[in-house]
Image: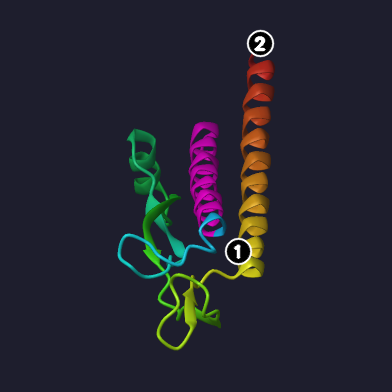
């Protein structure tokens, strides 16, 4: 694997984790939305990560020479969480049903914060890996001089 490939892999991780952080932010911002365009509460969104083969000329050469595939990560889909909505008794709420219950989004603050922290740590790890590959490439160039 060359330095550019290592940087491409880290960059794909950065992109995927940034998307994950954006989705968590969206979930947190919508955690009190009781009515969307569909008429029901907001449904929590979940990113689906998929490892995909690295493409490009080097990826093909490497694939031919190694037994294992070099893969990058991509967010291939964003799906709605199908967990049940929470219900609270609040007869004064405009979205309350005939019994006084309001359906709230299926967003859990603590769960979202854990997802945000893990995305942040993964993002930071990819930055460290990217910087390591960059530093190795720079040191190699210095040796060539």
Nearer to me, 27 or 71: 27
* Residue 102: image location, x then y, percent: 48, 78
Whether residue 30 is situated above or below residue 57 in the rendered picture:
below
Residue occupied by mark 2: 145
Q: CA distance from mark 1 to mark 2?
A: 50 Å
Q: Residue furthest top?
A: 145
Q: How packed is label 2: few (under 14 Cα within 10 Å), some, or many (20 or more)?
A: few
Q: How packed is label 1: few (under 14 Cα within 10 Å), some, or many (20 or more)?
A: some
Q: Earlier in the sequence, mark 1 or mark 2?
A: 1
Q: Quadrant of residue 40?
A: bottom left
* Residue 17: image location, x then y, percent: 54, 49
How are the colours assigned in the image?
Answer: rainbow
Element type where label 2 sits in the image? loop
Return the mark for residue 112: 1
Q: Residue furthest left?
A: 38
Which residue lies at the image location 57% right of the left edge and 58% below the top edge? 28
Q: Was residue 90 drawn as part of the magenta stretch in this picture?
A: no
Whether residue 21 is situated above or below residue 55 in the rendered picture:
below
Q: Which residues are magenta?
A: 1-27
In this rendering, position of residue 4 left or right of residue 39: right
């Amino acid at each position: 694997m060359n330095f550019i490939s290592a940087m491409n892999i880290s960059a794909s991780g950065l992109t995927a984790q940034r998307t994950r952080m954006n989705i968590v932010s969206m979930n947190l911002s919508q955690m009190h939305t009781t009515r969307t365009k569909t008429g029901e509460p907001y449904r929590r969104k979940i990113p689906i990560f998929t490892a995909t083969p690295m493409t490009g000329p080097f990826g093909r050469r490497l694939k031919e020479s190694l037994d294992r595939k070099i893969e990058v990560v991509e967010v291939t889909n964003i799906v709605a969480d199908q967990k049940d909505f929470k219900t609270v008794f609040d007869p004064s709420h405009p979205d309350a049903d005939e019994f006084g219950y309001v359906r709230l989004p299926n967003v859990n603050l603590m769960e979202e914060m854990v997802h945000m922290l893990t995305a942040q740590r993964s993002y930071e790890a990819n930055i460290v890996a990217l910087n390591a590959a960059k530093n190795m490439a720079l040191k190699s160039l210095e040796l060539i001089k």
